[in-house]
Amino acid sequence: MHTLSGFRAVCLLALFVVAGVLGGCSTNPATGKRNLMMMSWAKERSLAAEAGPQFTKEFGGEVPDAGVQAYVDELGAKLTRVALEQAYAEVPELDWDYILLDSSVLNAFALPGGKVYISRGLAEKLANEAQLAGVLGHEVGHVMARHGNQRMSKQIGMNIALAGLAIGVGLADDDSAFRQYGQYAVPAIAVGGNVVLLSYGRDEELEADRLGIQYMVANGYDPVGQMQVMQILGKASAGAPRPPEWLSTHPASATRVNRIQAMLKDQYAYTQGTSEYGLYPERYKQRMLSRLATLPPASHGGSASSMFDLDRPAQWCGICAEDARVAAKEDHNTRKVRVLPG
């Protein structure tokens, strides 16, 4: 009786999850694919409006120079305009903001709903406008592809399924095979599922790289700039401890460089060796670097160890630290479900 009840509970929960997944799938405006999206555009916009001021404050506020802020805003708006023109599905009006944070930490991230951030520390490491376009384009790609929404949706779906399986195992008879094997299957599936979600994170980063290049090229920038950004980040993080790539939310810098090099030789070969696609170092020096050099030190700093924690969603390049908080909360709730004897 218990075995049957446990099995029924699992089946009912599975049907609930499947119904939720099918009901939550929608066309990804950046890729044209069908993806699981449990959060509406309105919710994304609300999340950005609520979390945006907190993030800005946490990372030192805006750089106190209206000229460089206008420069970042101008470039971000150009990239977003192209992204919207190339969208496969309608994107409602969002509260797009492009903010240069007064922080020395190397950082760039985006909130679902249109808030895009880059730190002064990262901006000072860049050498040309194409590199800045690559960073901002990457973040715009995250927003357009709704990566934060996808990540939270997958995490929630996995946690619901795990909770259902754990309940089913707990209701099964002590001597049933379902109970005996289930006690080992639940934690094993939990670990495996988290590894799968990490791979989704790496795929999203590579997809945002591709979208960033797509948007910058459409604006006349040499996509070599995006590869240079990855090389800069790789050099800055050299020697910093990090887990193996398959246990990380971000692909290794070398992986990203190799992917971009392949695109430069194939898809974007036409952009190389022509004056139609530029890097614009002088313009970047004049409008960004020279102005930053006249300002006091950044109001927000960080230790060397915190500058490149690539597994934190608020670090280069994260989608949104709020995603991490939601995922951690869901994971904590799932871990509280235990297979109890009797």
Image (cartoon, rainbow, N blue to C red):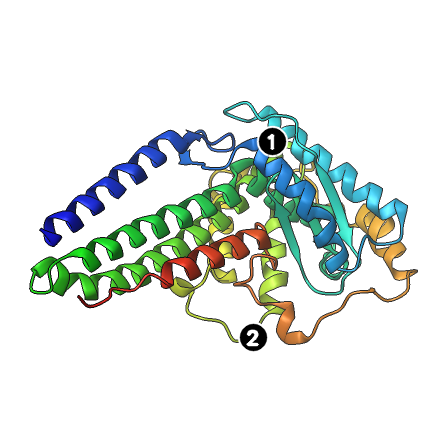
Residue at 58% over, 52% down: 322
Viewer-nearest residue: 188 or 339: 339
* Label 1 vs 2, first from the N-terminus: 1
Q: Amino acid at mark 2?
A: Ala
Residue 275's quadrant in the figure? top right
The type of residue carrying mark 1 is Ala
Count neighbours of disc 1 (C-alpha within 10 A) and say few if under 14, some if 14 to 19, many if 20 or more.
many
Q: Which residue is mark 2?
A: 240
Q: Nearer the viewer, residue 179 or 57?
A: 179
Name the residue: 72% across, 34% down. 77
- Callout 2: SS: loop
Horizontally, is 286 left or right of 148 in the view? Answer: right
Q: Position of residue 36 (x, y in %)?
A: 41, 37
The picture places residue 329, in percent across and down from the top left corner, at: 48, 57
For label 1, the residue is 83
Mark yes or no: residue 145 visible: yes
Tag on residue 254?
Answer: none
At 75% from the left and 65% from the top, the residue drawn is 104
**How many residues crowd around disc 2 within 10 Å: few (fewer than 14), some, or many (20 or more)?**
some
Q: Is residue 77 left or right of residue 140?
A: right
**Is residue 33 at least partly visible in the picture?**
no
7 shown above or below 254: above
Rendering coords of residue 26 (x, y %): 43, 29
162 relative position to 246: left or right: left
Which secondary structure lies at badge 1? helix
